[in-house]
Amino acid sequence: MAQPETTQAERELQPPEERPEAPPPISAAPSRHSAPTRDPSPPQARTPFLAALFSFFPGLGNVYNGLYLRGITFFFIIVGLIALTDGAEPPEGVILGFAIAFTWLFNIFDAYRQATMINYGFAPELDWPGKKRAGSWGSGGLVAGIAVFLVGFYGFLREVLNLDLSFLAEHWYVLFMAFGGFLIYRTVKEKKRAEEADGDAGAELEGI
C-alpha cells in the first residue's frame, strides 16, 4: 500500500532520521521558442592578394576581410577628399591630390595587412574563442574618426559657409610643425613610460 505523500511542513516536524527524502526539483522544460546559443567560430582564412585587389575600390578590401567599419571609414575619407577637389586650385588642389593618393594606397596596403593578421589570429572587429587580442581597433579607430570629421568639417567651411581656405594650403609649414611637435611629444611620452615600467620592474625584483 502506497504511503501518502507528506507536505514540506510535516517533514520539518518529523525527527531528522525519520524524514523522507524530498523529491528532486523539477527542472523547467526548455522553451521551444528559445534559440540555441553558439560560440562564434574562427573566421575563414582570407587571401591577402584578393583583399588588396578589391581595395582598388576604396574600402572594399576590408569589407571582404569582414572589417566593415574599417572599410566604410576608408570609403568616406577617400570620397570626401575627392569631393573637396571640385573647384580647388593650386596649391590646395595639389595637396588634396597627394592626400587622395596616399589614403588610397594606404587603403590597399591596410587590406592586405589585415587579411594577413586575420590568418594569424588577429582582427580588430571580429571575435571568436581564443582570439589574439593584439591588433585591436583601439587608437586607430580614434584617428580614423578624427580624419573623417576633419574632411567633412573642411568641406562644411568651404562649401556651406563660403570661407576662403586657400590660406591653409599656402601656410603648409604650420601642418609640418604641428605634426613634428606631435611626434616629439609622443616619443618623449613613450620614453618616460618605458623608464617608469623599467623602474617598477626593478623595484619588484629588489623586493623578492
Image: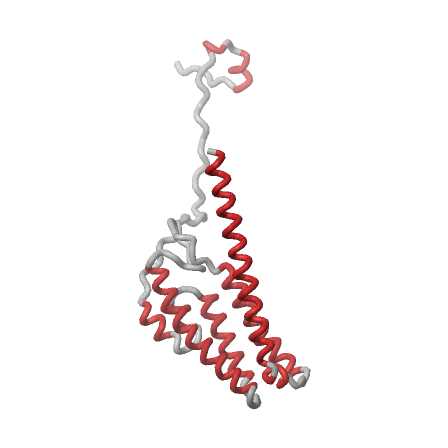
Image x and y of residue 154, in percent: 61, 78
| Vertical position of residue 85 compared to residue 31: above or below | below
Residue 55 picture quarter: bottom left
Looking at the rendering, which quadrant does residue 67 occupy? bottom left
Quadrant of the rendered image containing residue 170: bottom right
Looking at the image, which is closer to me, 18 or 190?
190
Q: Position of residue 129 (x, y in %)?
A: 38, 49
Front residue (pair 166, 196): 196
- Left/right placement of residue 13 relative to residue 42 reads right
Q: Is residue 150 above or below residue 14?
A: below
Residue at 50%, 59% (x, y): give it: 138
Instruction: Report the coloring of the rendering.
Output: secondary structure
Image-based side of 139 in relation to 153, left or right: left
For residue 156, side relative to residue 54 (left or right):
right
Residue in the picture at 55% in, 71% down: 179
Which quadrant is the N terminus positioned in?
Answer: top left
Residue 204 in picture, x, y percent from top left:
49, 38
Q: How many marks?
A: 0
Q: Which residue sits at x=31%, y=71%? A: 49
Q: Position of residue 57 (x, y in %)?
A: 41, 78
Q: As rendered, which of 12 and 127 lies closer to the eye? A: 127
Viewer-proximal residue among 57 and 145: 145
Q: Residue at x 39, y 78 (%)?
A: 56
